[in-house]
Amino acid sequence: MLKIAVLVSGGGTNLQALIDAQNQGKIPGGKIALVISSREDAYALTRAEQAGIPAEVLRRRNFAGQDEYDEQLLGILDRENIGLVVLAGFMTIISPQVIDRYRNRIVNIHPSLLPSFCGEGYYGLRVHQAALKRGVRVTGATVHFVNEVCDGGPIILQKAVEVLPGDTPEILQRRVMEQAEWKLLPKAVALFCAGRLKVENGVVTIKEDLSCSE
């Protein structure tokens, strides 16, 4: 059973989607073993407590430098024998040192169809504001592995969501979460835990599910 750490900063809706999927038996190869929050007031911590998942608060500002923060984060992940790190609305920068240690074992959910509306400064409602300002007819969400380029890692899964007349950033954000994010992230995690994801030359391939074969 692969142990999963979910890193959060806010309300934790994607964490809840993972918890619900786990409770429904949709992530048979993995278990959420730890939640790490960058804020002590994040509602995601309440979700973790209600689900009986151990949680810790790790604030970057409490450390003198990035190296000290990285050492603490990696120490926690190593201590818990974490096999997969999931960024679910985590607003603290993941350093190259952590990325290198967990190469192709850190996944992130981004609320657009990469490579659109991504990179530094594109997070939360800002992504949806940019999409509406550009006048796109279709947006969506992407799950990708994390590398040293912001939102630039290998793409695992994407799902398109229609932009409707009269949409506000808040309405569009909710639709993208409901129709794409909350579906894609648990599916990507399940695929990883089943050993069905392979990264080669920066491209992800999904291996056939042989468990259903005769």
Image (cartoon, rainbow, N blue to C red):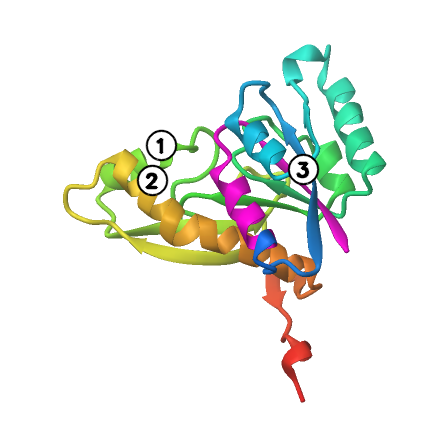
Asked whether, in this view, residue 22 is left or right of residue 195, the answer is left
Question: 19 and 74: which one is in front?
Answer: 19
Q: Pick whichever of labels 1 and 2 is earlier in the sequence.
A: 1
- Calculate the distance from the C-alpha at mark 1 to the C-alpha at mark 2: 7 Å
Looking at the rendering, the stretch of residues picked out in magenta corresponds to 1-22
**Quick check: 188 left or right of 140?**
right
Residue wearing tag 3: 53
Could you say which quadrant of the image residue 54 lies in?
top right
Identify the residue under disc 1.
125
Q: Is residue 17 visible?
A: yes
> Could you classify mark 3 by the number of other residues whose Cα lies within 10 Å: few (under 14), some (14-19), or many (20 or more)?
some
- Residue that extends furthest to the right in the rendered view of this protein: 79
Q: Residues within 10 Å of mark 1 (few under 14, many from 20)?
A: some
Residue drawn at the location 68% of the way across and 22% of the way down: 58
Is residue 113 visible to us here? no
At label 3, which amino acid type do we have? Ile
Amino acid carrying mark 2 in the image: Gln
The answer to the question of whether label 1 and label 2 lie on touching residues, with beta carbons closer than 8 A, is yes
Compared to residue 149, the image places residue 75 above or below, namely above
Residue at left offset 15%, top offset 46%: 165
The tag earlier along the polypeptide, 3 or 2, is 3
Hey, what amino acid is under mark 1?
A: Leu
Q: Which residue is mark 2?
A: 173
Q: Is residue 149 left or right of residue 167?
A: right
